[in-house]
Amino acid sequence: MTSSRKTKAALQAAPDLHAQLGLRPGQSIELLKELHILTRDGRLNQDSRRKLKQVNHLLQFIEKVRQELPPREGGLLLADHGAGKSYLGFMLYDLWRTRHEPGRELGHLYGIETRADLVERSRELAARLGFERMSFINTSAAESAASAALPDVFDVVTALHACDTATDDAIAFALRKQARAIVLAPCCQAEVAARLRMNKALQLARTPLAELWRHPLHTREMGSQLTNVLRCLYLESQGYAVTVTELVGWEHSMKNELIIATWTGHKKRSAAERLQALLAQFGLEALLAERFPALRA
């Protein structure tokens, strides 16, 4: 087949590929190849399919948030915590770079990641693609709030499967940076489960509720559920309206909870009181200073 025929065939196949993969119109196939989500011939394996579906669904939620935010001169600032290979960041940039709503276009996107090799790879890819409004910071979510390389305020803070307490660090970052919206898909919430296990003997004697985490599997699941409930109450206590929903179908990911918080300025005292009551009920008072410091102010 001649070069011109190959080009024509590729163009004819592109719409079909978009439909097969559930992509939005105009979404860059070449970018997906650069990210190694697609092979050079446009194929993907089942793991890549699941990852693509997760990221695309999260993009839809973030896009809705973007449309509802008040404009900011120069465009919106976004921080992506636990960026990893920056699938989310690059695909979000690809989506937003075509938006021309004054004040709601992408101002700058910052990927925050602890692994230096992934940060360097993302920097090289952004330079090769000409994505000039992307920066990648080699630091942890916990340390990022104090980083001089990041702005003092952000519009959107997101984290896709930031593991264990990295999600809490992303929340702390968002509060310090006065984020107007927070979009989180938590992952591997182990901290609370570990503390439940430590206090299990005392709690089993004190309250029948402890039967909910008597078995190890239940301890893990109960810890995960309780962690996210506490996070939502904390965000409500700090002036955010919170929505909890599914990211994608359970067949695509077991880490499927999505927390969306938008700034209202109305700090709910009842949320703070319930959070502290839950900590006391489950013997988790030690978490107050470490994970919910604003409640002690």
Image: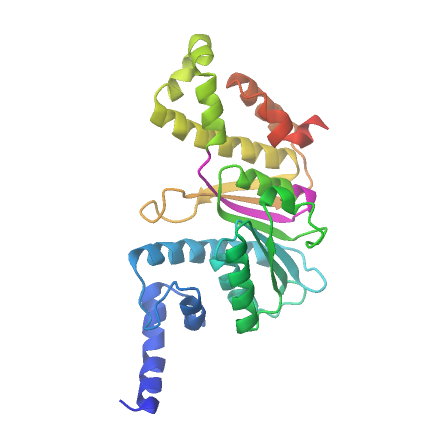
Residue 280: percent from the left, percent from the top? 56, 18
Above or below, 134 against 116 in this view is: below
Magenta part of the chain: 175-189
Residue at the (65%, 57%) spot, across then down: 77
Task: Tell me which corner region of the image, top left, top right, bottom left or bottom right, holds residue 14.
Answer: bottom left
Q: Nearer the viewer, residue 288 or 194?
A: 194
Farthest residue toward the left? 1
Farthest residue toward the top? 205
User: Along the horizontal axis of the image, is 172 left or right of 190?
Assistant: right
Residue 185 shown in magenta: yes
Q: Evaluate whether residue 78 shows in this view.
A: yes
Task: Tell me which corner region of the image, top left, top right, bottom left or bottom right, holds residue 277.
Answer: top right
Quarter holding the N terminus is bottom left
Quarter holding the C terminus is top right
Residue at the (66%, 38%) spot, across then down: 239
Question: What colouring method underlies this structural image?
Answer: rainbow
Q: Evaluate whether residue 263 shows in this view.
A: no
Residue 266: percent from the left, percent from the top? 68, 38
Residue 122: percent from the left, percent from the top? 53, 62
User: Along the horizontal axis of the image, is 210 left or right of 49?
Assistant: right
- How many numbered tags mark residues here? 0
Q: Nearer the viewer, residue 70 or 105?
A: 105
Residue 187: percent from the left, percent from the top? 45, 41
Farthest residue toward the front? 117
Residue at the (48%, 57%) spot, across then down: 85
Residue 113 shown in magenta: no
